[in-house]
Image (cartoon, rainbow, N blue to C red):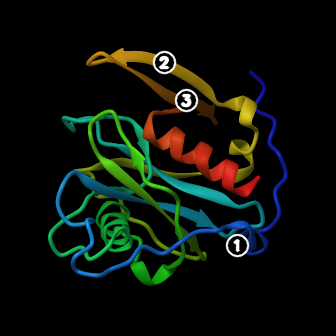
Amino acid sequence: MSHAMTHIPSLSSLHSRFNLTLPATHPTMPWRGGAQAAVLIPLVNRPEPTLLLTQRALHLRHHPGQIAFPGGRAEAQDRSPICTALREAQEETGLPPANAEIWGCLPALSTVSGYQVTPVVALIEPPFTLSADHNEVAGIFEIPLAALMNPHHYQALRFWRKHKLHTIYAISVQKKFIWGATAAIMRNLMLQIA
């Protein structure tokens, strides 16, 4: 499969293409409780824009070694998906919340494991210093955003689980195999940008 990169405009010009919404933070909102999670989609503003990703630690019980956006389960103090995504990104990568300019949220994604994951899109301005929490993250890296912009690079994989047909997406970028919720979020981001 060819992975020729597609040229994309600068991130600042992409901002106008996003019809993203900021979630309400009213205390009675359904964000609290249930299997809620959020991930940060860190768009790094470089001459050729990149996405910041992590590789989960190999000793983790769930999804060891998988490529993922920084993020995780909502905690009691989190008032919104944005709070969860920023907190988790700082815990996992050392990225200070002040370095993230929030653009908004993509639609929440239901995972096979029962989570509602809200992707929070943020512009990250270099320079920044990262430090992986090795209890959760084996590594931190960036991939070119342009490599994700061709819809033909994504594979749809279908499988049955608990008498229900599921579809998951996968993509291979720079010798890294990305699948599941992370690939689905990347695909949704690509559709939003395209």
Relative to residue 31, is residue 139 depicted above or below?
Answer: above
The correct choice, above or below, for 169 with respect to 46 in the image is above
Q: As displayed, is residue 25 above or below residue 66?
A: below
Q: Between residue 61 and residue 72, name the one nearer to us.
A: 72
Depth-wise, is mark 3 or mark 2 nearer the camera? Answer: 2
Residue drawn at the location 57% of the way across and 73% of the way down? 124
Q: Which amino acid does label 3 sit on?
A: Ala
Mark 1 packing: few (<14 Cα in 10 Å), some, or many (20+)? Answer: few
Secondary structure of residue under mark 2: strand
Structural crowding at the residue carrying mark 2, measured as other residues with C-alpha within 10 Å and reported as few (<14), some (14–19) or many (≥20)? few
> Residue 193: percent from the left, percent from the top?
72, 57
Which sits earlier in the primary sequence, circle 3 or circle 2? Answer: 2
Instruction: State the residue position of label 3.
Output: 170
Q: Mark 1 points at which residue?
A: 15
Q: Which mark is residue 158?
A: 2
- Spatial CA distance of label 2 from label 1 is 33 Å
Q: Which residue is drawn at 67% across and 70% down?
A: 45
Q: Is residue 63 left or right of residue 46?
A: left
